[in-house]
Image: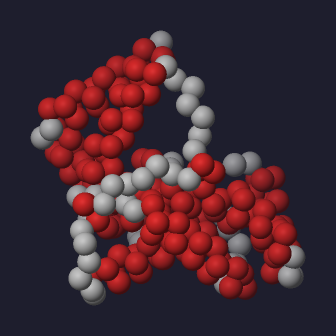
Amino acid sequence: MTDADQEFERQLLQAARNGDLESFNQLVDRYQATVFRVCLRVLRDQGRAEDATQDTFIKAYGALDQYHGGSVKSWLMRIATNRCYDMIRADRRRPAASLDAQPVESEPEWTMEPVSENPDSYASRSQLSAYLERALGELSDDQRIAVILYDIHGYSYDEIAGITDASMGTVKSRISRGRVRLREILRADEHAKELFEAVWRQSDDRAT
């Protein structure tokens, strides 16, 4: 994102603080898909992810005066990850069916991106994605969120430290340990291991 884009978003947020609901709705339009994807991967349930996404923007609107500059995107993601943590903690305080038994449904239409790769490559990536989703579910909550933010959504260490309210060293440790655990899980399944290697070969072929 360019400096001009970030400044425009800060102007939208300032206008929202002054009572301009349309400006806040523009921020929702920009980030609802991103927030939903992170919540879905953390919570691993579409309905709960939709609830967390809605709660994120409701909380953000009520906390506009608490924004003190910096990246609007990171500010929203901090609210979203905190909401996910709250939901996970609430689950642990009451008996509930295991989320592992609940399939992750397809994302709502507004979160889907067009597929431009060939069918075979897309099928391989889709299968690998399913393995990765299950493997992510076996990580600790802190590791899962750090890996999702860094490896899937491309946030920097510094941004993740701000989003998760953790030190830089803690963030790096969570990502490193999470990656090691993911590799162990994927290597334990021969089919997942083969898919992982095939996808990387396809990526190398496109790069040459």
Tell me what residue is drawn at x 30 percent, y 23 percent.
Answer: 198
Q: Quadrant of residue 171?
A: bottom left
In the figure, residue 96 lies in which quadrant?
Answer: bottom left
Nearest the camera: 4 or 188?
A: 188
Residue pictured at 87% horizontal, 76% vertical? 20
x, y (%) of residue 49?
Answer: 48, 65
Q: Residue at x 70, y 64 (%)?
A: 28
Would residue 162 appear left or right of 180 to someone viewing this image?
right
Image quadrant assignment for residue 123: top left
Note whether residue 149 is visible.
yes
Residue 8 versus residue 55: which sits nearer the camera?
55
In the image, taking residue 136 as reference, residue 190 lies left or right, namely left
Answer yes or no: is residue 80 visible: no
- From this view, report whether residue 204 is shown above or below residue 173: above
Residue 38 in the image, given as x and y percentages of width and height: 48, 59
Q: What colour scheme has been applied to the protein in the rendered image?
A: secondary structure
Residue 65: % across, % down: 73, 85
Name which residue lies at 82% across and 59% down.
8
Q: Position of residue 141 (x, y in %)?
A: 31, 67
